[in-house]
Image (cartoon, rainbow, N blue to C red):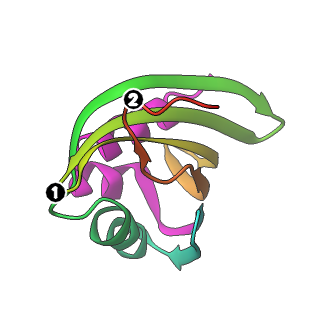
Amino acid sequence: MSTLGPRFARAVAAKDADAVHRLVTPDVDFRGLTPGRAWEGTGPDDLVEVLFGCWFGDADEITALVDVTAGAPVEDTQRVSYRLALRTPDGAYAAEQQAYYRADGDHIGFLRILCSGFRPAGATAG
C-alpha cells in the first residue's frame, strides 16, 4: 500500500508547503470540495495556495493530526482520510478530509479532496 497519502496528511497537518511540493508532480491535477465551494488547480503552487492560503490560513493553527487512515485502493486510485484539530481566532475546531489520489512513480499526480469544513470542537450529533 502506498505511503504517499499518509505522508501528504502529515505535510498538511504541519502546514509544510515544501513537503507538499516534494510529494506531488509538477503538473498535479487537483480538485477539492469544501462545504461552500469547489476548488481546482494544476501544479504544486496552485495546490499549496488552496491548502495554506485558503483552507488553512495564517491565523488557523493545526494543533494535532488526530487520525490518519489509508484505505484499500480502488484499482489505481488510493484513499487516505485524516482528521485535524484546529485553533482559530474564533475557537477550537475539527476538520476531516478524504483524499483520493493516483501515484505517478513516487509522487501524487492526481488528487481529489473532500473536506468536512471546520466543525466546532466538542459538538455532538443530535
Quadrant housing residue 26: bottom left
10 Å neighbourhood of mark 1: few (<14), some, or many (≥20)?
few
Magenta span includes 6: yes
Q: How many labels were placed on the picture?
A: 2
Q: Is residue 11 above or below residue 37?
A: above
Q: Are marks 1 and 2 in contact (CB under 8 Å)?
A: no
CA separation in Å, label 1 and label 2: 17 Å
| Residue extending furthest toward the front | 126
> On the rendered image, what quadrant is the N terminus found in?
top right
Q: Which residue is mark 2?
A: 122
Q: x and y percent of residue 110 in the render?
A: 62, 58
Q: Is residue 120 above or below residue 115?
A: above
Q: Residue shown at 75%/30% (left/top)?
A: 73
Instruction: Label 2: state its secondary structure.
Output: loop
The mark found on residue 54 in the picture is: none
Left or right, residue 117 beside residue 62: right
Residue type highlighted by circle 1: Pro
10 Å neighbourhood of mark 2: few (<14), some, or many (≥20)?
few
Tell me where the magenta segment starts and ends, as one range: 1-29
Q: x and y percent of residue 42 in the render?
A: 52, 76
Q: x and y percent of residue 120 in the render?
A: 39, 43
Of 13 and 109, the residue lying toward us:
13
Instruction: Label 1: state its secondary structure.
Output: loop
Left or right, residue 110 beside residue 9: right
> On the rendered image, what quadrant is the C terminus found in?
top right
Q: Which residue is mark 1?
A: 89
